[in-house]
Every structure is written in structure tokens, then in C-alpha cells.
């Protein structure tokens, strides 16, 4: 693995002048990390990334963020979802300075208190399912490695199970709808679909997740809160019926 990482560093990193710059300054100097910096700002994590550390960050590029459904990204950046956004971003950060030749075969525990795993396939190094495309960008307070997709953690404290999530959503949304507050109902259901889309596969199978993503896409084309409520509720009922 050492030789492989060395090849990546030589081939992709080259000479990067980052002397005297912290992680945030290094990311700001590049044109690749605009969305990451915007998310860190909205999550109130900029100062943490500028702290003494040391920290190792696996940094998704703007192209990596673009792979997320647009609705998911927009929802994550909303002020009311700061807790979820913080968890997602912390899942990309490890305490300590881990250069590429020191990245372990064993998992590392992130600041989100969840592990990330490393693997090699066809001479490509992955963290979870994300490809590491650039390594060993030095900062005064740590190391930056670049990845090609956003890492999604499990969010058990927010979403204990798909069933519990849907049940709570419906119990909150129905009274709002029945009292004429269709906008609030639609917002509750849309947030539930977003949470479902981020559940790991052991909590929601791929078929149900595709159903959720399809519904989210349909919602983005609707203007009426009433229609959004009905569309989202139909999807929630279908997913609930499929759960054992």
C-alpha cells in the first residue's frame, strides 16, 4: 500500500506550496473545495478545522458534492439541519496526522465517532466506497487527502430505524395537514425522505431507497404544498409497507 500511495502522491499531487497555512486556508486556496467550505461554515465547523489539531481530513471536491442528489445537498445546508450536516462533515475528519504511507489497513475512528475503512482495488485506494484521488497535502494543523465522493455516515441518534422515522413523520405531518397547514406537512415529509435516502443499506434496501429518490425528484417539480404532501405520503406508505 505504501508504494501505491507514493505513486498517487507523485502522479497527482506534485509540488503544492502550503507552508504556513491551516486546513481551511489550504482548501480556500484551491478552487476544488467551495462546497466543502460552504458546508463547514453553515455547520459552524470552520474554527474547529482551523484549530491546532492535528487533524486528517478526507476532503470531497465540488464534483464529489455534485454527485449527491441536489435536493439532498440543499436540505443538508438548511439551518434546521445543522446537526445532520455536522455529523456528515465530522465523518470526513480524523484526529491525528495520517500521511498516506501511514493510513492503516484497520479502520480509523472519525470525529463523528464512526469508523472509516480503507481498501485497495485494481491499484486504486478507497476510503469506504470513495476513491482517494490526491494525497498528503500538508497544512500547519494536519493533512488533507482528496476524495471523489461524499462519505455518508450512519445517523442512529437521528434515525433509529426506518419504521420509527416514518411513523414519527406521519404522526407529526397528519395533524398539520388536517389543520390546513399543508406547507408544514410537506416540509416534514420531505425531510423524512431526505433522512431515509441517507440510511445505510442494512436499514433500508436499495429498492426502497430508489423509490425514495424517485419521489424526491418528483417533489422538486411540484409547486403545491398539498400535492407535495400527497406525493411524499404515498412514498412513505409504500416504503413502510415494504419493511418487515
Image: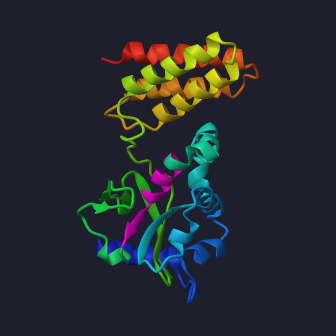
Q: Position of residue 101 (x, y in %)?
A: 32, 77
Q: Within the magenta stretch, is there residue 32?
A: no
Q: Position of residue 28 (x, y in %)?
A: 65, 72
Label total for image: 0
**Residue occupying the far right of the picture:** 223
Rendered position, 197 above or below 3: above
Residue at screen point 66% across, 62% down: 34
Using the image as rendered, state which of residue 113 and residue 151 is in the foreground: 113
Which quadrant of the structure image shows residue 124? bottom left
Q: In the rendered structure, does residue 90 fall within the stretch colored magenta?
A: yes
State the extent of the magenta-drawn residues as a range.
84-95
Asked if residue 21 can be seen in this view, the reply is: yes
Q: Is residue 164 above or below residue 195?
A: above
Image quadrant in which you'd find residue 121: bottom left
Q: Is residue 117 above or below residue 180?
A: below
**Image location (x, y in percent) of residue 64:** 56, 54
Residue toward you, 99 or 22: 22
Q: Nearer the viewer, residue 75 or 60?
A: 75
Picture quarter with the N terminus: bottom left
**Quarter-wise, where is residue 188 in the image?**
top right
In the image as oriented, which residue stretches furthest toward the bottom?
Answer: 19
Vertical side of 137 occupied by 70: above or below: above
Give how far across and how far down residue 133 sits, in percent.
Answer: 48, 65
Residue in the image at 38% along x and 58% along y: 126
Amino acid at each position: 500500500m505504501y508504494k501505491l500511495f507514493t505513486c498517487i502522491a507523485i502522479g497527482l499531487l506534485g509540488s503544492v506550496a502550503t507552508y504556513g497555512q491551516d486546513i481551511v486556508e489550504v482548501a480556500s486556496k484551491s478552487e476544488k473545495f467551495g462546497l466543502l467550505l460552504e458546508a463547514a461554515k453553515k455547520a459552524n465547523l470552520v474554527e474547529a478545522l482551523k484549530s491546532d489539531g492535528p487533524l486528517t481530513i478526507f476532503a470531497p471536491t465540488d464534483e464529489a458534492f455534485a454527485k449527491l442528489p441536489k435536493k439532498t445537498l440543499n436540505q443538508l445546508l438548511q439551518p434546521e439541519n445543522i446537526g445532520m450536516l455536522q455529523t456528515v462533515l465530522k465523518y470526513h475528519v480524523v484526529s491525528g496526522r495520517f500521511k498516506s504511507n501511514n493510513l492503516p489497513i484497520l479502520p480509523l475512528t472519525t470525529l463523528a465517532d464512526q469508523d472509516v475503512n480503507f481498501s485497495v482495488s485494481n491499484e486504486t485506494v478507497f476510503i469506504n466506497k470513495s476513491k482517494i484521488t490526491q494525497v498528503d497535502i500538508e497544512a500547519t494543523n494536519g493533512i488533507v487527502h482528496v476524495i471523489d465522493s461524499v462519505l455518508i455516515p450512519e445517523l442512529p441518534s437521528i434515525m433509529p430505524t426506518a419504521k420509527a422515522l416514518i411513523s414519527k413523520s406521519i404522526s407529526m405531518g397528519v395533524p398539520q395537514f388536517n389543520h390546513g397547514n399543508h406547507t408544514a406537512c410537506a416540509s416534514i415529509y420531505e425531510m423524512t425522505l431526505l433522512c431515509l435516502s441517507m440510511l445505510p443499506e442494512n436499514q433500508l434496501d436499495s429498492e426502497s431507497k430508489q423509490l425514495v429518490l424517485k419521489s424526491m425528484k418528483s417533489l422538486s417539480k411540484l409547486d403545491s404544498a398539498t400535492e407535495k404532501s400527497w406525493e411524499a405520503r404515498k412514498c412513505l406508505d409504500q416504503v413502510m409497507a415494504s419493511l418487515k
